[in-house]
Structures are given as C-alpha cells and as structure tokens.
Image (tube, helix red, strand yellow):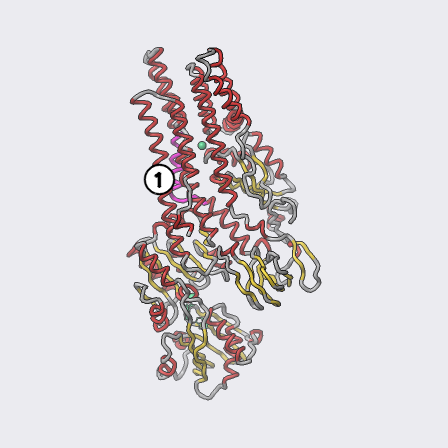
Amino acid sequence: MPGPAVEAAARSGGDHHGGCCGKAAGKWEKTYLDVLGICCTAEVALVERLLTPIQGVRAVTVVVPSRTVIVDHDTAAVSQFHIVKVLNKAGLEASVRAYGSSAGAGGRWPSPFTVACGALLALSLLAPLLPPLRWLAVAAACVGSQPMLLRAFAAAGKLTLDINILMLIAVAGSVALGSFTEAGAIVFLFTVAEWLETLACSKASAGMLSLMSTVPKTVVLAETGQVVGMGDVAVGTVVAVRAGDVVPVDGVVVGGHSEVDESSLTGESFPVPKQPQSEVWAGTINLDGYISVRTTALAENSTVAKMERLVEEAQNSRSRTQRLIDSCAKHYTPAVVVLAAGVVLVPALLGARDLELEHWFRLSLVLLVSACPCALVLSTPVATFCALLRAARMGLLVKGGNVLESLGEVRVAAFDKTGTITRGEFSIKDFHVVGDKVEMNQLLYWVSSIESKSSHPMAAALVEYAQSKSVQPKPENVTETCIYHGEGIYGVMDGKQIYIGNERIIARSSCRHHQHAGHQETDGLKGVSIGHVICDGDLVGKFSLSDTCRTGAAEAILQLRSMGIKSVMLTGDSAAAAKHAQEQLGGVLEELHAGLLPEDKVRLVRGLQARHGATLMVGDGMNDAPALAAADVGVSMGLSGSAAAIETSHAALMSGDILRVPKAVRLGRRARRTIAVNVASSVGAKAAVLALAVAWRPVLWVAVLADVGTCLLVVLHRRPSRAARR
Ligand SMILES: Nc1ncnc2c1ncn2[C@@H]1O[C@H](COP(=O)(O)OP(=O)(O)OP(=O)(O)O)[C@@H](O)[C@H]1O
Ligand SMILES: [Mg+2]
Ligand SMILES: [Zn+2]
C-alpha cells in the first residue's frame, strides 16, 4: 500500500484543463483536509474566501458536519501544504488527511490552551480564601481564547461575523463588568464544547466513504505478469486479479472462476460467484480463485469513483430546509448584533446609570452570545450527513439532502417489474418456428446475434438459450440495429429485416398476415412473456419466457404498506406476465399497469404524484430513466448498469436487495424527525435563555452553556435507530 498519498484523480490524456485556462496541463488533485476550526456555516464563508482566490485552486467543498474541506487544485500551481498554511494562519487547525486513515486524527485530546484555561479557572475559584487569585480567571480567559483570537482576526479580515468574534466581545464585556470568573467560564465552556464537537465529527468523517482508498494504485497485466501504474491502463486491457486482491478496475471476467465480496459497494457481505462474462467492479475483493478481467472503465470513471464523488456532492448539496435555515441565519446574526448594541445604547442615551445600565449591558452580552445560530445551522447538515452515510453503507447512494427529505415524505411507491420486482433472469419456456420459411438453427442464429446487441434482461436469456442449442451468435454480422423501448429490437442480418419483441413490434414491422390464432399455443403457460420474430414482414418464430420474483419483494411491499405507503407495478411487459408476478407476490400490489411504453410510465408517475403526493419509483436505470427522473425519488436498482443509472436517478441501490427500499424510506423519515427535533431544541434553548434574561436576570455563562450545549446535542444526536441499523 503506498504511503498516505492524496487521492490522485489524475486525469490522463487530453485533459480539458490543459487547453482552456492556458496553464501547463498540471496534475489536478483533490486534497482532503481535516479543519478542526470549522464550527458551522459561518466558517464555510471564511474557508471559501481564504482558499478560492489562490492561483491553481479550482473548487473548494466544505463538509461542515465532518469538518472536511476538499480542495480541487493544480499541484503545479499550489501545493497542499500551502493550502494548509493559509488555513492555519487563520487559526483553523487544518491538516492533510492521510489516505485511507480514519479522518480527524487531530483533536483526540483537548488543546493545551483549554487545559491551561481550565486549571487557572479552577484555581481562581479559591479567590474567597485569597482574593488576588480572582485575577487567575482573567488569565484563564486570556490563555483559553488564543485560538479564538486567531480565527476572530481572520474572520474580521474577511469581513465575516463569526462565533469567535461574538464570544470575544462577550468575554471582554464580562471582564469590563468585573465578573472575571464568568469571563473564564465562557472561554472554558466554549473551548471544551468545540473539542467535544471535533471528537464527534471526526467519528462522522471517519465514516466518510473513502472507498477509493481500497482501490490499488497498480495492476498486474494478465499476459505479461508485469505490474503497471493505474494511469497506464487503457480500456480493454486484460488484468490479472489473484485471490485476496482488491479488484483494481471495473471490467468483465474473461478467464478463471472466483467468488467476490462486493460489500464495499452493495453493503451485502455474501460472496458473489464470478465466471467468464461476469461483471466485476473496482473496490470489491476477490476472495478466492484467480480471474483475468478485461477493463471496461478507467480508474476515475469506475463505479466506485462515481460513488465517492456522488457521496461528496451529496454532502454538499443543501436540502430545501437547510437553504431556508442558512438564509435566515445570514440575516439573523447581524440583526441580533444590532439589537444587542441597541439594548445598551438606548438606555445609556436615555440617562440610565450604574446598576440599571449594568443590567442592560449584561442583557446585550447575553444577546450577543445567542447571536450565533450554530446549533440551528448545524441541525440539518449533521442529521443529513449521518443519514447519507448510513444509506451509503447499506449500498444506497442518495444524491443529497433533498432526496433524503423526499424519501421521508413518500406516499406511494411505483415498481418496475423486470429487474426490480423480478430478478430479470428470464428462462425460456418455449421457442419454436412458425411456418416453414426458416428452420430452427437459422432462427436461433439470427435472434441470438441481434439480441447480443441489447442490454435487456430477455436478450441475455435468448443468447444463452441459443448457445445451449450450440448456436453461436455473431453480433459482428448484424449490419444494423435499432432498439424500440417497450417493444423490442430490430436488426438486419444476411440482408433480412428482422424484428424481435412483443405485440407492438408486430405492428411496427407491418407484419403481413399476423393471425391472432398464434396466441393460444403459448399462452397456455401461465404468465409468460410472449416474444415474436418477424423476418421481412413474415412471422417466423415465437418464444415465451418467464422470470421469477426477487425474494423479499412481497415482504418489502408489505413493509411499505405498514408504513402507509401503497405500491403499484408499472411494466412494459404483457398483462399476463404482470398478473403472474402479482400472484407470485400474493396479491400485495394495489394496482397493475402493463404493456407500457416508457412515456406511459412517466404519465402514470405524474398521475400518482397528483393523486397521492410524493412518489417513489424503483426501476432499472436504463429504459426507466424518464420515469425515474419524473418521480420525487427515482431509485435505480442493481450494480450492473449502475454507472448510467447513477447519473439519471436520484438514488442508486447498488445491491439487488429490494428490502432496502422500505429501509431507505424509514431512514428518510428518521432524518426528518431528527432535523425537526434539532431545530426545535436549538431555537427553544435560545428563546428560554433570552426569556430568562429578560424576565429574571441575564446570566452570561448560562447563555453560553445553552448555545454550545445545543450545538453539542445536535452533533451527538445521531444515534442510528435500531430500525435503520437492522
Ligand atoms: N431486447 C428485447 N428482446 C425481446 N423483447 C424485448 C426486448 N426489449 C423489449 N422487449 C419486449 O418489450 C417489452 C417491454 O420492454 P421494456 O424494457 O419496456 O419493459 P420490461 O423491461 O420488459 O418490463 P419492465 O417495464 O417491468 O422493466 C418486454 O416485456 C419485451 O416483451
Ligand atoms: Mg425494464
Ligand atoms: Zn458557529
């Protein structure tokens, strides 16, 4: 394992950076930094203002709940250590996260400032015995506020009003009022709370998917045994993967047999058997056996790299609630600071003196301390961050906070049949020629060669069936193909125009004498899907295939029903096949819609949204993309074909376990509840402190305790519920 190198998503070849900005095509790197000094979104503005102007920095992403800053920069123009220096000059305690290590290495122990502050404060409590000791409280405040001073100056320099400035004013105010102990207590409370928050957040960021850290940087070429760097591997290269190795690339097995642990991607820990033609993914573990794999995607385009980028972007995409809170927070802080100033200036101008003025001054300090909406502003991102991570660990990639919120609001679930409710592994029940124009082997040769061009689950079954009759498909002899979603596939072979598909494709092929008589001989088999082969306008073959429902499909639909969510099936397959699946499920589905074209699915999803509200659609990412995009939450299932699906759907379920769908809805609901509790407690605590200050008397350290206490509560209030853990 190479040393802690930062993820080098080196984009090789004609990198689009080389040209456009006229710089030497540098090596773009993503540096992950732990920045302990981040308290809440107030510091996000500060970090962005510090880093964005640096020459060579292309993008800065701040993930507040894990105190992670991800900087996309050109190493030729700016080194990661220069970036760290800029952040540390502002007292943000930044460090480069070593690759694959658990994040947040720093912050294990309170900083020496905090310990010294605590010790001095404790000594100052002996002041009744020895009065001069009370000055130790001021010393405690000065020692403990070192880090705050640095950040306050940096924030002031960048004209951002952040918690450090407010706290310093409050400390200075209480020293001015002669309550030294209170000044020391504010600093001590604040720095201890910061340290505890850092501990909690480093645990969270340790969970941050650093999947890429599991992917090796070198590969072994299969034919020469030579070890080469990942950057030199082109698509189509055959690499060797020995037992115990981590699969280095996405690819297709071309030789050997083994079992692979895909839990890093799907969250499912049972080993999956792999043989020639099986797909394997980078980041999964080759448990036993030796396989040679033909690369189908380069390192940074691998599914695991897409997953990692997706989780990062998801952390950064703010949900509707969060945007609302952040915009309120932006106005809240300056408004409260102005109010705090007014609360002391007005009485002073009206001639208030001594005790009365002191009361107003204390009240204005309490207002100041309550001015930073830390807890409120953290309430959404922390809960969202943890929920997204938990989802990713169970193989569900959710694209951001608002998708998570929508998951929590779902009222109806629409399921695609093939590959979603059913395994999408068809078996051929019957395959025969019609008429005497074409004999069987010729038919099998045409069908399997043309179907080799289709990614439809039925196509694989038809190709396999032909091979079982020792007919080898020759896709290279297919001179033209066209996929008709919802109908079938068209291909030209040996000068013949061949259509393969369902009823609709017969109409499309303007098949001359299609008699409906054909139905009865194959409809006998219950619930099978019927396929037709038309060659130059003549019906020359028929076949029927059937699929089995996934285990757990009925259970998943029942669980959704127990959560008040109704389930419907939308399928392009025939009504017989849909009814057959419904019987296998024990009739749990409330509605069946069959024989749909992809655009029909979109129309039906919109109908469900209009009738019931938030709609969840679960389908395979390929031909259900429009319906998945139309739903409030479109979940694509299955690891294969997920690369495309990840782009089009709102969430990608990497495993085939349909029981994760109700689990995901529960996760969304739980995240919404946590956010509501966090918002209520942070607003409630501030209101209580202010009410106490006005009604009784303003006590500064209570205000600080309330502020940092609710921050801590929000950060710690993330226990995964038993349900979500199950
Ligand atoms: N490559 C193909 N070969 C043969 N028939 C096909 C092919 N593609 C589609 N069809 C026919 O068109 C019908 C609809 O296809 P479509 O992919 O829209 O739905 P589906 O995937 O079968 O079902 P679902 O909508 O539940 O996923 C299929 O049921 C099948 O009868
Ligand atoms: Mg389909
Ligand atoms: Zn804050």
Prevailing secondary structure class for the magenta stretch in the rendered image: helix
Q: Position of residue 188 (x, y in %)?
A: 47, 25
Q: Amino acid at mark 1?
A: Val
- Residue 321 covered by magenta stretch: yes
Q: Position of residue 433 (x, y in %)?
A: 45, 84
Q: Residues within 10 Å of mark 1 (few under 14, many from 20)?
A: some
Left or right of 553 in this view: 115: right
Comparing 580 with 437, the one in front is 580
Q: Position of residue 194 (x, y in %)?
A: 48, 31
Q: Is residue 551 above or below residue 323?
A: below
Question: In the image, which residues are magenta?
Answer: 317-334
Q: Residue at x 59, y 58 (%)?
A: 247
Q: Is residue 300 above or below residue 238?
A: above
Q: Position of residue 631 (x, y in %)?
A: 37, 56
Which residue is situated farthest in the bottom direction here?
436
Dot 1 falls on a residue whose secondary structure is helix
Left or right of 708 in this view: 478: right
Q: Residue at x 36, y 11 (%)?
A: 354
Residue for badge 1: 677
Figure label count: 1
- Residue 575 covered by magenta stretch: no
Which residue is situated farthest in the front direction here?
129
Comparing 723 with 370, the one in front is 723
Q: Is residue 205 above or below residue 550?
A: above
Q: Quadrant of residue 580?
A: bottom left
Comparing 109 with 305, the one in front is 109
Q: Quadrant of ligand 3?
A: top left
Q: Is residue 287 above or below residue 352?
A: below
Q: Quadrant of residue 427?
A: bottom left
Q: Quadrant of residue 626?
A: bottom left
Q: Residue at x 49, y 49 (%)?
A: 311
